[in-house]
Image: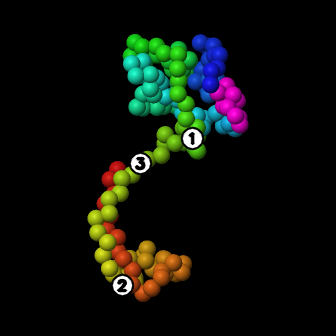
Amino acid sequence: MSLELSSKDTYEEVSRQLAAALTPPLDDPQKLRFTQQNNYTQQPKPQAMRFPTQEQDLPDMLHHFGQTTDTLFYEVLDLPLPQLERLKTLKASLLARLPCQLGSCGGAVMQEREEGLAKNERGYCLVAAVMY
């Protein structure tokens, strides 16, 4: 896809124009994430652009470390970009899965029992570590 844009267009205007040009049109332009082009490989850079916190125009979007390109890659997201960037990534590692009697693992197993999710009288205790 090719769009004619003004060098005075801001990040929001670029995303709005692209959202309108897509087939079918995208209802929320904030669901677009842009990635700059690597001038050497002609491929997207590994890190996508963050949603701008200050005014950013098209030349700022196309210029990176002394290199200017005329290509931006885009991705359509399920969530608006500002909301996606506020999410935290957690890494959970399962350390052990131990058999236990119903209720001896704590409130979570009893909660499942009350909701009718427990299949039998024996359950499993999960021991996990969460990394932030």
Packing grade of label 1 (10 A; few <14, some 14-19, many >=20) is some
Mark toward the viewer: 2 or 1:
1
Q: Amino acid type of disc 3?
A: Thr
Q: Residue 58 or 75: which is nearer the viewer?
A: 75
Q: Position of residue 39 (x, y in %)?
A: 42, 18
Q: Position of residue 41 (x, y in %)?
A: 40, 22
Residue drawn at (55%, 21%) of the image: 55
Q: Position of residue 59 (x, y in %)?
A: 53, 14
Q: Is residue 95 above or below residue 76?
A: below
Q: Is residue 122 above or below residue 87?
A: below
Quadrant in which the N terminus appears: top right
In the rendered image, which residue does mark 2 sit on? Answer: 101
In the rendered image, which residue does mark 3 sit on? Answer: 89
Q: Position of residue 113 (x, y in %)?
A: 49, 81
Q: Amino acid type of disc 2?
A: Gln
Q: Amino acid type of disc 1?
A: Leu
The magenta region covers 17-25
